[in-house]
Amino acid sequence: MTDRVVVLGAGAVGTTAAWVAGRDRLADEVVLVDPEPASGASWVAGGMLAPITEAWPGEREVLELGAASLARWPAFADAVEHASGRSVGLRREGTLSVVVDAADREDLDRIVEHLRAWGRDAERLTGRETRRAEPTLGPAVRAGLAVPDDLAVDNRLLLAALRAAAERVGVVVRTEPAVRVAESGGAVSGVELASGEVLAAGRVVVAAGAWSASLHPALDGLVRPVKGEILRVRARAGSLPPPTRTVRAAVAGRAVYAVPRDGGRLVLGATQYEVGFDGDVTVGGVRDLLADTERVMPGIADYALEESSASFRPGTADNLPVLGAVPGAPEGLVACFGHGRNGILLTALTADVVGALLAGRPVPDESLAASASRLTALEVSS
């Protein structure tokens, strides 16, 4: 058996897995396979590191997993920057969660109650206090929640830095489609590529996001595509400046976010549809994103629209990722997918998990809720 690790999927999670495997010398060779590296959900992302403002009643395990990863992010960002010589664009200004009507304010109060019951706190703001904190917010904003520890990162800078870090430690990148994980005698034997070549491997990390389910029968039905659309906009000369913090808003029950980027830019998102692998950006999605953002930040109407994009978050039935050995899968197949809307956030914790799995060490206790062993009783709902 060859001592080669093959990682399928070169988004943030997969590229991190390959970098960690190469950095820690967990195999004689590490190969990263993806027909379009640094694309998909990792490319079309806001880059929010925001487990507190993402929190929702009934999803405490999701919150705790995200909080454990957020605590690792400053050190993770430093490590990637040191290894690559590139910035990842970590922003430490914090996050504001805002609402514009009475019903959404009640939801905000309910979330604050749950956070406090779970031992998490955040500063509740009046509408005036919220607008004073970020003057670009409009008069429709009625209340807010200040969370200084919810951060953000430039996902595209992160992807470039991870690729550079991986290549510096000898990771080989193959830009070919993978068809399936091959096995022999109950163990992984390699990866079959679209060309017909079988790339021999003793261990395979499946980190292909929403496409992971097609790579082995044991993974079928464990992850599904959840379509999301984003816009990238830029302040023009004379425009009101963008907010300094990430702004998450609820507008008539719909979630919208605006994440700052350098150069007066913002990433706006995100719609959410259960439509399979339909990658079109829809007129209705763009309309709703712009209308909801303009309700919160009226000055956005003067910004330049630079990009509209869509991709597919890898969704699971319980909104937790699938990490580790999947029941019924061959020995040596390591699942590393299903991060949903929190893929960038969970990358820091996933780095520690995949490193432990490949080295044969216990995974961090904080990650146990995402263990693939739970899948014996889990079915993906559509």
Image (cartoon, grey):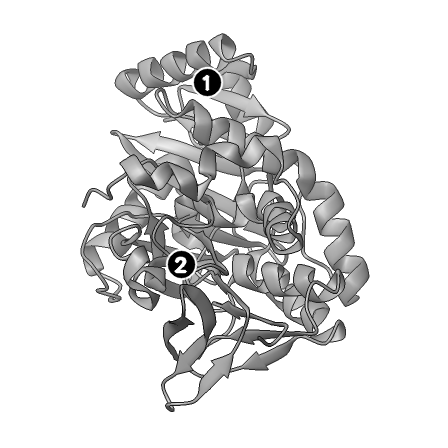
Give the residue displayed 65% in from the left and 52% down from the top: 355
Give the spatial CA distance, label 1 vs label 2.
Answer: 39 Å
Circle 1 residue? 127
- Along the horizontal axis of the image, is 153 left or right of 125? right
- Which structural element holds mark 2? helix
Q: Position of residue 146 (x, y in %)?
A: 56, 23
Q: Is residue 376 above or below residue 205?
A: above
Q: Position of residue 100 (x, y in %)?
A: 34, 25
User: Residue flagged by tag 2: what amino acid is it?
Assistant: Gly
Q: Name the front one of labels 1 and 2.
A: 2
Give the residue displayed 46% in from the left and 38% down from the top: 370
Residue 194 falls in image quadrant = bottom left
User: Residue flagged by tag 1: what amino acid is it?
Assistant: Gly
Residue 238 falls in image quadrant = bottom right
- Which structural element holds mark 1? helix
Q: Badge 2, how many Cα within 10 Å: few under 14, some, many 20+? A: many
Circle 2 residue? 209
